[in-house]
Amino acid sequence: MIINEAQQKLLEATKENATTEQLIWLSGYFYGLANERVGVNLGSTQNSAPKSLPNVTVLYATETGNAAGVAQKLHDQLASSGVPVSIYNMLDYRIKSLKKETLVMIVASTYGDGEAPDEALAFYKALMGEKAPKLDHISYSVFGLGDSSYDLFCQTGIDFDKRFEELGATRLLNRVDSDVEFEENAEKWISEITSTLAHAETQASSSEGSNNTTTAQNWSESNPFGGELLNIIDLTDDHSEKSVWHLEIGLDESGIQYQPGDIVALLPKNDPTLVAQIIETTGLSPDETVQIKETSYTLETALAQKLDITSLNKKFVENYAKQTHQSDFDLSSNEIQSLIKDGDLLDLVQAKPAKLSAQALVDLLRPLRSRQYSIASSQAAYDDEVHVTVKQVEYESLGRPRKGVCSNWLASLSEGDSIPLYIKPNNGFKLPKDEQTKVIMVGAGTGVAPFRSFLQERDAQGIQGNTWLFFGEQHFSSDFLYQLEWQKLVKSNVLENISLAFSRDQAEKIYVQNRLVEQAQEVFKWLKEGAYLYVCGDRNHMAKDVHNAFITVIAEQGQKTADEAEAYLQDLISQRRYQRDVY
Ligand SMILES: Cc1cc2nc3c(=O)[nH]c(=O)nc-3n(C[C@H](O)[C@H](O)[C@H](O)COP(=O)(O)OP(=O)(O)OC[C@H]3O[C@@H](n4cnc5c(N)ncnc54)[C@H](O)[C@@H]3O)c2cc1C
Ligand SMILES: Cc1cc2nc3c(=O)[nH]c(=O)nc-3n(C[C@H](O)[C@H](O)[C@H](O)COP(=O)(O)O)c2cc1C
């Protein structure tokens, strides 16, 4: 034993009574003392905070950059307060490194059915596995990002928090589960951590780790740039079962820079007809003044431009029931459950009418949020424009036709209209640095958008070959998005191969995943030659089927079991050679 029994007792007693903050202080104190004894002069350790505060490691799990942004802010704030800090995308962080950590801050978003983001999956699995290391030397805190309209709200953050505790780590601050409006919570969490860890006289910061972090942009959700709609084209013809729009938006004088693979967030307006119906049903006046945060609006403007009126969730319905004192409100009833799942505000106020002031109604509603779109253009080709490919979302629910907010708002716009927007850098979906590296792109429907950007970029740079696009849609004649552009790119050999899957042009359904398996030998050859795989589009069906198709290709061609093929794919993820932008 490195310490004697008396020292051990003293330590145990100190551990029992000390706050986490005191433990952190003590760990730094002893570390500094030890360094002094071995001759490293770190200055005085008396009276004030230690100059050798242990390093803070910020780990983030992200898909579209929100968690990366929060993690980066925490990193910057700690660094500027003199706290030594490192930041890592979980993709770049090995679980065994936890053994040498003292302070770990986790920022994690949630996807799919409560799953961790793709790039964090390997770390997540290792942490949840039997071989995970003991973490009783670590203090930590978790900031979860999610959306409360999903059943498994902030599940990844919850899982990390629970597992760190199970492995013996000490919670420095309680976990925060943050809804879509996460910015305010993030500021609070960051400043609490900073004030807990930062001491006036701590040493200058150091920063290392992944350089693959997001780039700050001036425009944001609360301060979007007003882009001018320059052109809007229907990419599908009258016989199509869907409408997909191509929009070109001007960025003049915005200073906006983006890279192929990045995302643009667009801030929509609600359908005016739906707003009018809600106002009529509630009997409120459209001109009544309401307050949101510090700003006044008419009720009509607030409902049209500021508030989410199309999705319900349990918390909202619960609060509505409370506010309106409705005693017959059985939240577990089928009626209410189905309203929460499939209904909107109009359904609720129709089904459960009640007197509610305009301000009370506004206070209940969540803010109307931006929608994200994979950028379909390259600034190497269109330096002052951003293009998007948008499918108009229309469906029926509870016997009433519904329209997706943003896609229908965009489809209703005319040239010259303004579209509030900002860019979300997407570091997890980037072309390889070496232009000779082969690139396999799989996109169904609007999932093809970022590949237009990739290929425009390579075209503008005069790079030929080494590219293979798998594109799928329903019908060749009505849904072949950007057909002429692909043909041109094939002709100029910017696009070396194109494989098409039109699912409904023959008796049996054919999808991109079928094309991948059909071309297994060549796909595997490209993989062995170092190809990068990119998948974009539908998360729930297409991306899963394409993943399974890759497993089949790798297992078949590489003589591997399904588990080995899965491990091969996981390895590609950790090499950043398998990147997905799925939604
Ligand atoms: C990283 C990323 C990139 C994206 N890129 C693109 C892109 O390039 N192009 C694109 O078109 N979209 C893209 N999306 C999706 C886009 O952000 C929007 O979600 C989409 O346009 C719908 O938004 P909306 O406001 O029109 O619909 P909303 O008002 O948000 O309504 C959508 C909701 O309606 C419900 N719904 C939809 N269809 C049905 C149905 N058939 N039955 C029952 N309920 C249904 C679902 O709950 C769904 O969440 C991307 C999303 C992400 C996260
Ligand atoms: C396709 C998709 C699935 C999602 N699934 C969940 C979910 O199951 N639970 C949840 O709380 N949030 C879910 N979200 C919300 C995200 O976690 C949230 O938008 C978060 O801010 C994204 O952070 P990121 O940009 O760091 O990836 C989902 C979002 C998308 C686009």
Image: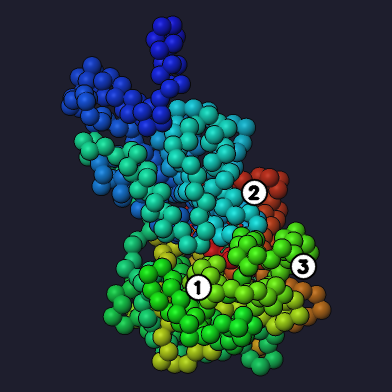
Residue that badge 3 annotates: 335
Residue drawn at point x = 50 percent, y = 31 percent: 169
Q: Which residue is mark 2?
A: 566
The amino acid on which the numbered mark 1 sits, given as a three-letter code, is: Gln
Q: Nearer the viewer, residue 455 or 80?
A: 80
Q: Earlier in the sequence, mark 3 or mark 2?
A: 3
Q: Which mark is residue 359?
A: 1
- Tell me residue 259's x, y (percent): 39, 68
Separation of marks 3 and 2 at Cα, in angstroms: 42 Å
The crowd level at tag 2 (other Cα within 10 Å; few <14, some 14-19, many 20+) is some
Which quarter of the picture shows residue 542? bottom right
- Tell me the SS state at disc 2: helix
Q: Quadrant of ligand 1?
A: bottom right
Q: Quadrant of residue 86?
A: top left
The percent position of residue 573, horizontal first and vertical second, equals 53, 52
Distance Cα–Cα, label 1 vs label 2: 53 Å
Q: Secondary structure at mark 1?
A: helix
Question: Nearer the N terminus, badge 3 or badge 1?
Answer: 3
Distance between mark 3 and mark 1 Cα atoms: 27 Å
Q: Which mark is residue 548?
A: none
